[in-house]
Image (spheres, rainbow, N blue to C red):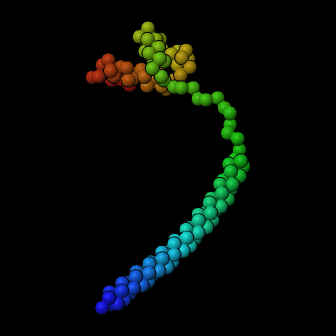
Amino acid sequence: MQTVPIIVLLVLIAAAFALCGYLFITLKRDLHSLEKRRRTELDESRRRLDALGLELADLRKDIDALPEPAQGVAPQSALNLNRRTQALRMLRHGEASEQIATTLSLPRKEVELLVKVQRLLLDPSGDATS
């Protein structure tokens, strides 16, 4: 009678070993497929990196082939706040827009525009075109 529980115990141990073997083989198969996928992705990444390196080298050649930018004088700033104040002060002293433009090294049209805007601000109902 004691042989039956021993046989059952041996069958259970054999089933446990079989299950462990199955899990081990399954795990190894999954690890192998993951390693294969990782290698494929790594190769793809290296291929893309090489392509980007070649593209970067081509862009550097294109940049080197560009002509050097002209080293010219930066355009003089037009009517900043300081010059605007000076122009309005000169205008109040009765100086002509041509003389203001010459004195402050400004375009004559900008000074004329400033004069018109100032006249509009002082007399909104009047005609600023004069």
Question: Residue 50: horizontal and vertical position, in percent?
Answer: 65, 61
- Residue drawn at (59%, 65%), measured in percent from left and top? 42
Left or right of residue 74: residue 12: left
Q: Can residue 26 be seen in this view?
A: no
The image shows residue 114, relative to residue 91, as above or below, that is: below
The image shows residue 128, relative to residue 16, as above or below, that is: above
- Residue drawn at (51%, 75%), measured in percent from left and top? 28
Q: Hey, which residue is sitting farthest left in the picture?
A: 125
Quadrant in the picture for residue 129 = top left
- Residue drawn at (68%, 56%), measured in percent from left and top? 58
Quadrant in the picture for residue 76 = top right
Question: Residue 87: horizontal and vertical position, in percent?
Answer: 46, 16
Question: Residue 121: horizontal and vertical position, in percent?
Answer: 32, 21
Front residue of this view, candidates 56 and 104: 56
Please state, as top left, top right, bottom left or bottom right, where the N terminus lies in the image: bottom left
Q: Hey, which residue is sitting farthest top in the picture?
A: 93
Q: Hey, which residue is sitting farthest front in the picture?
A: 1
Front residue of this view, candidates 115 and 1: 1
Front residue of this view, candidates 12 and 24: 12
Q: Is residue 41 visible?
A: yes
Left or right of residue 75: residue 82: left
Please state, as top left, top right, bottom left or bottom right, where the C terminus lies in the image: top left
Q: How many labels does the image show?
A: 0
- Residue drawn at (46%, 11%), measured in percent from left and top? 90
